[in-house]
Image (tube, rainbow, N blue to C red):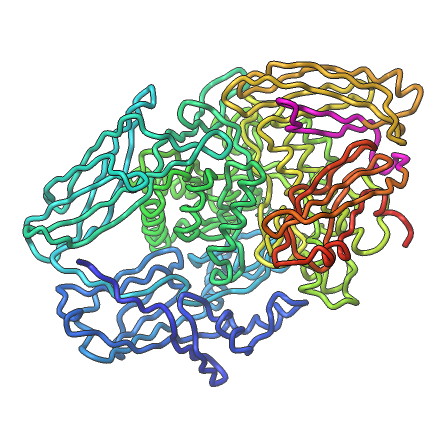
Amino acid sequence: MSETFSLDGNWTLKGPKKIEISAVVPGCVHADLRRENLIPDPYFRDNETQVQWVGEENWTYTRSFELSPAFLRSERLELVCQGLDTFAEIHINGRKLAETDNMFRQWEFDVKALLREGENSISVTLRSPMPYGRRKQEERFLWQTGIGHHRLEGGQWVRKEQSNYGWDWGPMIVTMGIWRSIGIRSVNTARIEDTRVSQTLSQSFKKATVSVDVSCSVVKRSKLLARVEISKDGDVVATAQSSVARKRAALEMTIRNPQLWWPNGLGEQPLYTVSVELVDESGAVLDREVKRIGIRELTLVREKDQWGESFCFQANGHRFFAKGANWIPSDQFDVWGTDERNRSLLESARDANMNMVRVWGGGKYERDAFYDDCDELGICVWQDFMFACAAYPGFDDDWVANVKVEIGQQVRRLRHHASVALWCGNNELEHIPPILGDEPGQMPWDEYINLFDRIIGKVVKQNDNQRAYWPSSEHSPVGDRKYSQNPDCGDAHLWKVWHGRRPFEWYRTAFHRFCSEFGFQSFPEPSTIETYTEPEERNVTSFVMEHHQRSPIGNSAIIDYMLSWFRLPVGFENTVWLTQILQGLAIKYAVEHWRMNKPRCMGALYWQLNDCWQVASWSSLDYFGKWKALHYAARDFFAPLLVTGVEDLDTKNVEIHVVSDQLQRAKATVAWKVVDLSGDELESGSKALRVPANASKTVKTLSLAKLVKEHGERGLLVKLFLSQDGEVVSENLVTLARPKHLKLQDPKLSCKVKKSDGGSFEVTLSASKPSLWTWLELKGIAARYSDNFIHLLPGETRSIRVSPRDKTSLKAVKESIRARSLFDTYQEI
Ligand code: BMA
């Protein structure tokens, strides 16, 4: 049986200044130096500037290991490096084995001749990628975004995480290290080199044909057999076996009445285990590979329709609206972005009713566990290949050859995952003006098309014919390819709000088919800011706060929009919380509009889900995974059944819409309540509805002209409720004036706390006057809230479950709890 002798664990790291410390593999140089206290916390204040030298040096990892005689007798021994970042030179027992130049590739080398019985040594020297990138830029300059503003040069020449060089939400810290597992694999007779699982579903979805293609690496000629077993929860549901001919075996199995895998919100995520064994003549198992699959149809549908060409995903015969966000690396240092942290971020995505993340092309291909989590949580993955916002050297044959291997390996690694929905060539190469063209520094269109359409497109097709390949995000497939943000086809990155400084209302003029990026920034909450600032720096324009703001227009854009919507807040804490409320409002504006316009628009993935350090950014989850106001808002605006209202400031009408993503029709009741700013009811009503499946519907128009005459635009609030079986499933607030102009009164919030189960607490909130964006905070206690930033009218009560991260007493919760609302943000302290 093929075995791997792991070389993970303790190594020694040697570097400049006579540094010699213990190191952990997988990991990176910065993490090792930090562990030994040789560098300060790079995320604190502007310490990032003090760690720049690390990425400019060369570093050597070494270790020794003992191999048993039995292991050494294996017919072949291969060093398998699952990831080396990036320019590595490997030596075994003092002899040079190889050089590598791509962080995203797995490297395998035959090392039998270099190994000996007893003690062996290995060293991996990592050469700084910085001089190389700079030299290449001097030889032939290639354009990239954002250089000069917290971005280092030359990254596009190196097959390495591009955001390492700095991004408009991330630090410039160029890593080096053995960043994935490393080990020596023994092979006797043969091993499984690759397993390709494909599936075909019958039209009724009652029968799945699963094909497994096994290819082997053979050391010694012999009769080989491939055996496959598919099981579900321990029960075998199908088996097959076939002899291996010309190093390959093709097996086919049928599963009747398969349990179908669904995106989150549409059904369950049953997973089947496909276990493949390679067996020799004597029946001995030579190698085994196990993959988990979901039986499902998950395709991209593009067809002519009344608006142009659709762009929407379909699962098991049902088109669905993609709801989610863009994923960036969860830490600047991969090793700090643990599987647990990633899992918790993805669970937060699931809890906010998301069904898709886009793994953005400026980061990295994530670890297997990430895709396993997505399979389990029903989060579909739009997978970019790792190219972003720069002209790339498509003219360089060696570079292209390197990329081809990388793409092939990654597609083969990830293609069995139920969640992987789409391969996408790159992020924004097509539509950022200076990237493509014939000027010096630009990538010519024909070279671009050759690389992304032909070469990469072909590698994808060869390795996966079950999924669509989309050359770029964004991309216009019909008519003029250079027509950026064509509303009639393809996907679009809509940045008129924020980068273009248009008002939030602009979103309501956009009718794009699939909105794969749009966003608005906010600050992380005060408790997160405390982890990177000194107390005297807690002002949004202090040097350190600006250091943790990478968008050149960042703070001024936030404040500009804030003044348009809200009263100028008083004090630092109110300011940062209010930026979150503002962000939530911006994205709600966009998403509700696009959901209302389904099926014309069939996807909204906002920029961005998460952060890689503590920073002001477009994220809805901060570096520690804490939910910003946007994430709570996302759970509401992505709800399977949504009620929303669109105000017409000319007619003073409010149109009420109900959007359903459910696959069945549903009975529901929509109710509305118009109140004045004291909370006194002026009008109310309700209507029973049959909500059509997977559709959007206008259900009622409220004419408020008369009430506006009596109370003024600034004197009214409209609350909408959608209930099913007596339970409110969605609610919303509509105003006819900007919140800053509403004459809000002190809501006199009351908050009662009692102990609940599992270490949580139940907080009951009520208000004596309308309380907008009411939020709870436990000062000094990290906690998750079942709901936050809610609108309360007098007479309503809301129970919120508060789950502290660490065990906390009722007394401590009572002492630290604070309930505030919009009104409080501008009260003089
Ligand atoms: C996009 C992304 C990122 C960037 C973001 C915010 O278009 O693709 O490159 O971080 O905008 O500016």
Between 272 and 753, the one lying in front of the other is 753
Whether residue 719 appears in magenta in the rendering, the answer is: yes
Whether residue 493 appears in magenta in the rendering, the answer is: no
Q: Is residue 600 left or right of residue 712?
A: left
Between 244 and 239, the one lying in front of the other is 239
Does residue 223 lie above or below 510 as drawn? below
Picture residue at 65% right of the left edge, 27% below the top = 727
Q: Is residue 618 visible?
A: no
Q: Is residue 188 left or right of residue 211?
A: left
Q: Is residue 571 visible?
A: yes
Query: Residue 782 location, x and y as percent?
Result: 66, 56
Query: Residue 371 location, x and y as percent?
Result: 42, 46
Residue range in magenta is: 718-744
Does residue 759 lie above or below 78 as drawn? above
Residue located farthest toward the bottom when viewing the structure as drawn: 18
Between 164 and 273, the one lying in front of the other is 273
Q: Look at the image and tell me in which quarter the N terminus lies.
A: bottom left
